[in-house]
Image (cartoon, grey):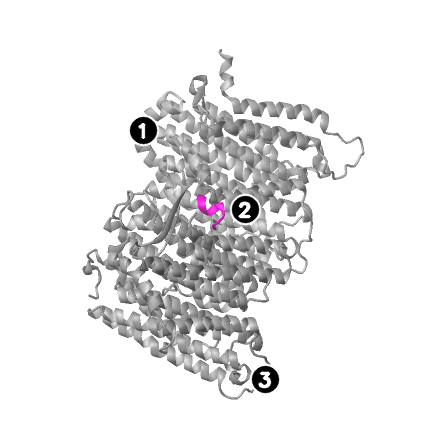
Amino acid sequence: MNFLSIFVLIPVLMLLGLWLVKGQKGIRSVMVVGSSCLLVLSVVLTILFLQERAAGNTAEMLFTASLDWITPLHIKYAVGVDGISVAMLLLSSIIVFTGTFVSWNMNKEYFLWFTLLSAGVFGFFITIDMFAMFMFYEVALIPMYLLIGVWGTGPKEYAAMKLTLMLMGGSAFLMCGIFGIFYGAGAQTMNILDIAHQANGAHAIALAQQHIWFPLTFAGFGVLGALFPFHTWSPDGHASAPTAVSMLHAGVLMKLGGYGCFRIAMFLMPQAAQDLGWIFLILTGISVVYGAFSACVQTDLKYINAYSSVSHCGLVLFGILMINQVAATGAVLQMLSHGLTTALFFALIGMIYGRTHTRDIREMTGLMRIMPFLSVCYVIAGLANLGLPGFSGFVAEMTIFVGSFAQADTFHRVLTIAACTSIVITAVYILRLVGKILYGVCTDEHHLKLSDATWEERLAVICLVAAIAGLGVAPFWISSMIDGGVAPIVNHITAYAADLSLNPFM
Amino acid sequence: MDYSQFLYMTEELSLLLVILLVFLADLFLCREPKEGEQLEPSAKSPIAWVVLCLFTVHTLVNLLPCLNGSMEVTSAFGGMYQHSAMMTVVKSVLNVGTLVVFLMAGGWLSRPENQVKRGEFYLITLFTLLGMYLMISSGHFLMFFIGLEMASVPMAALVAFDKYRYESAEAGAKFVLLAIFSSGLLLYGISLIYGATGTLYFDLIGAQLSSRSLMSLVGLTFFLSGMGFKISLVPFHLWTADTYQGAPTIVTSYLSVISKGSAAFVLFTVLTKAFGASDLASEWNRALFWIIIASITIANLFAIQQQNLKRFMAFSAISQAGYLVLGVMGGTAQGQTALVYYLLVYMVANLGAFAVINVIEQQSGKIRIDDYDGLYNTNPKLSFLMTLCLFSLAGIPPFAGMFSKFFIFMAAFNAGYQWLVLIALINTVLSLYYYLLIVKAMYIKKNESPIATFRSDNGTRAALVICTIGVVLFGIMGVCYSYIDSLSVL
């Protein structure tokens, strides 16, 4: 048993604890203790990881361990982390920790499903065996149905069903892709590293097979990464979900998509990734711009943020599809940055909605005077989202665009310039939003009586703001760690020659 | 004749012993009502205890030597009767399923009109099980046919068990007519095969048949249609919905799992043994390819529209049968493992769901999906267990259903049917939709007059415990699959 498995063990123990305790106090203490343990564990993991790297351990994955699981099919429970997964684990534990405080008044069943969801997320990031990853991936998806369906707002039943079915449709393609990879590589191992480096009986996947399974796998993960045209679950789902679930979903779950695209689809099928990546690059370019434009015309706070997420998650896929180290590092930074800012956004929207009982921006104005703390944080979240230097968004987007522009051909250049426009559009909708609801004079007399944030809300918000600012001011620790994780993957992909004739735009 | 050959049939003999003992017990333990006496619903039933104890002993006695690995491949009566460890495992799976059904049946059998028939229920069920045993172990078409008939004729009696209920009697009539018709088809197919080869031993047929003779092709077709009826695959599924709806819920659960599972395993055995020649294999693979696509898709589309839960489960069972038969594709050892494993997992999940449906029907008489609205508020535990079982049926991890689906798809993929797997996978999304409809009814929808809170009987509780343990553990514990795989040989 490797200590990485504790990341799954803690949520399982939390489930057990939640099942046993009685009363709101007991539930809260289980959740706080459990999520704090996760946070501490991920910080410890980061430190250990950096120490190990500083000590000169250059293995691609650290802390690897492997346990036989279903031997006849070569399925193992294999764990291991590199810079990318450590960053993702850190992100997940921050979101789970703050999400606990944001959903302070929720009941036991809610927390049970919430914890199951986080178990899936942590499991996904620590495992490096395709079957185990797929299992955890689905464990993370299904609690969403009940979380949105029972505790959501608005057209929740419709949104929950749409989200679940679309994501499960994605995972149907994904399962097919996994079979394709497993049998294409010789049916000897499900371990990602073994398949990529053709060790332990795996051989290279034939090019013709890669061309079939790469689009399936990428689209399968892409559904969760809000890839156009499979993004339509995202606005409805996020808008209807309860606050902490929106946070976890936009903050962490959508990153599962990007992470999976990079780690499984592109890493294991390098030639197809280069040959056919252009299709997805165009689609994701559309997500980036289309998402931003859609956010401009929305009037519901959550819809604005959900479309903004489509746009920013599009940048993640955009970065990794550029297949160069700088852009891919930027993409992972964007996962982190977007995870934190969008979680902050959703947390604040939830808090504001909890007070005003409306999310329509036409019905709110002048909130700055009524709830100064929440409003100031809202401005911070907005600025971080539009990429103001000093916050994480700037670091991430800058790195992505610098990396993308380094691709010297017209196709990539044009797409990069098109995607860059999203920065401007983001500024438009964020500034309009902030001006509309926060400044001005409050006209609604009910709103005048509202109170500012409670202590648990403040704690959650401050944690997120600190993380965003920390990442923005001193990105080098994290970014060098991510860079170290991205490099072997990008080098592995670019080591194969691309067949440019498949791209009609080159 | 050498009577010692009977000793090879250990499982059948021990089941027969159980049946005889239950017969005797039934004589003394079941009370006939006197003239004009009204029976009260009573939970006390000594016969149930006798059956449960005997049957548990029977299950363990047969399974344990097999788990030790001391089982040898044997055959008796010149190869008419075959016996291998894999067959014992399948029979044990059926045993566990039957045991769960018996546990669930307590509430239903304690109704006044059923009290006098308690013993009969157990006996008839055990007789069908004996038929399935013979079917599984057959190495000869006659043996196979005897087993099949022994399994299906008493089954009609079971379906019509609530004979005073119009639907039950109607379902029984439908079942028996169609069962006889399909047996006729099957028998005609067998006779053609005999005409083509001059033998009925699976092994000998396998060596002689080829697709060059039209007679053997027609024989294969009739055989497939007969089996398609037993497993209720589209287009031979038309009896399923009516029969499932009309039959007593306990019998429906037995039909949907035990009867179907044994037939699917036998389909695999016969197709690989008797029709295993490569040119014939490509024929039945092509046929099954379309049958599976039709079964899964059409059943899913129909299931979405159902309001009656038993009809709903009927269509769900048809589509699950389609997934089950995916393991037959290509006739590989991996497919056989996946099929048996799928059967095991499907059994616990489906029986768990039926246990909830049955206990709610017994307590409140409600059987429609919209009756389940708001069930979570009144009976949280039952709803939770139902949700686990439905998630497992839909293939959601960490429950066992996802593992079994993954493995059976993997087997079909490995056998070269990639596109079939993709179509089946897309269908799992459809099936998730309708399973979620029930979850939605229980958890999300509001109801002004929900099903009242009640305490389920101990038998149902025990059944649910067994099913839940299965649903949670069979997947995570990889050893189940590995064990079955170690026995799977062609």
| Magenta-drawn stretch contains B210 | no
* Residues rendered magenta in the picture: B396-404
Residue at 47%, 26% (x, y): give it: B137
- B225 vs A224: above or below: above
Tell which residue pokes out farthest to the bottom in this image: A441
Foreground tag (3 vs 2): 3
How many marks can you see? 3
Do tag 1 and tag 3 residues touch (Cβ < 8 Å)? Answer: no
Q: Residue B193 versus residue B126: which sits nearer the camera? A: B126
Q: Which residue is mark 2?
A: B313
Q: Residue furthest top?
A: B1
Residue carrying label 1: B210
One can see residue B149 in this view: no
Crowd class of label 2 (few under 14; some 14 to 19; many from 20; radius 10 Å): many
Q: Which residue is mark 3?
A: A448
**Which residue type carries mark 2?**
Met
